[in-house]
Amino acid sequence: MTLTASNTGPDRVFRLRDGRRISYAEFGAPDGRPVLALHGTPASRLMYAIAASSAARLGLRLIAPDRWGYAGTDPHPEPSLSAWAQDAAELADGLGLDRFSIIGISGGSPYAAGTAAELGSRVIAMALAVPVGPLVSNGSKRRLPLLQRLSFFWVGQRPSLTKSVFKAYGRFLNRWSRRAVSLAMIGQSRFDRELLRKPAINDYFGEISREGLRAGGAGPAIDLQLFSSEWHVPLDRISAKTRIWIGKDDKLVPLAAARELARAIPGAILTELDDRGHFWIAEEYGQVLDWLAAAGRDEGEVRQ
């Protein structure tokens, strides 16, 4: 698909109390049930433009911020998942949201889980697709394939290197978008390679990543440093209804860590998809949003 003004919605900027900016966009039903929608690594708020029609059909209002260091959102001086939860709460307060649901995709999932852990009953339901799970506290690091270990722990703990790599990748995207997206498919599953051969899907990933990296590589540098460290958030205190989806042939995120994340969240439902890699959600937002809408509706009825 091509992301244009007609299907991305107006860009907006929220000012936090300390003066930092959070850029965001909204998709779906303007007066629908609010859902904080957190994008992957690297990407941007535009990741959820493709889900706008599904969200509208289900009566969901997707509020999609650019995370720290992506597009127009300023980095945090001392980033942590708890600090993100505080920023998310301030954004929700500013938008007049008492309670809301959350969706996190890939690298957005740790931030979603941290928000649900810190904000308790304020988060109604949480959907996590192809999530990055905890890598340090449960021994998952020892079970990582070499490439993932290098990505998360060698590159991830060197922010200046990460910034340089992703800044260069952003330039590559600007000049040769389809080639750059195809390059990222090296070593991925057959399903993912076939999916990214579709011009519309290739263009979609190129656009959302190009927008996210227009500010440079600060966003991915923050992400990888947090992912390769202790999370320091009480996952066992999450009260939101939670469901997690992973593809059994996902080569990008560690499956053992995603499964550990499901075990750590009380009552979480884990759905493992056969013959799916990492990027399947680009064509299957419907099933995730269907569950999120039902979970949010049921929980709201219970609490009324």
Image (cartoon, rainbow, N blue to C red):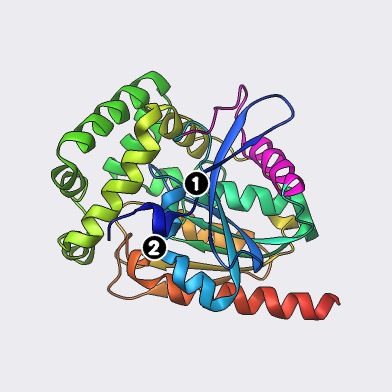
Residue visible at 41% across and 59% down? 7
Residue 184 place in picture, x, y as percent: 22, 45
Identify whether 77 is placed above or below 2.
above
Identify whether 268 is placed above or below 152.
below
Q: Picture quarter containing residue 152?
A: top left
The residue lying furthest to the top in this view is: 160
Q: To which residue does mark 1 refer?
A: 139
Q: Residues within 10 Å of mark 1 (few under 14, many from 20)?
A: few
Residue 223 in the figure: left or right of residue 137: left
Residue visible at 44% across and 66% down? 51
Identify whether 155 is placed above or below 182.
above
Query: Is residue 149 something one can see in this rendering?
Result: no
Q: Picture quarter containing residue 256?
A: bottom left
As shown in the figure, which amino acid type bears the numbered disc 1?
A: Gly
- The main secondary structure of the magenta stretch is helix
Q: Residues within 10 Å of mark 2 (few under 14, many from 20)?
A: many
Residue 135 in the figure: left or right of residue 294: left
Residue 134 place in picture, x, y as percent: 53, 47
295 within the magenta span: no
Query: Is residue 179 something one can see in this rendering?
Result: yes
The kind of secondary structure element at disc 2 is: helix
Range of residues picked out in magenta: 72-94
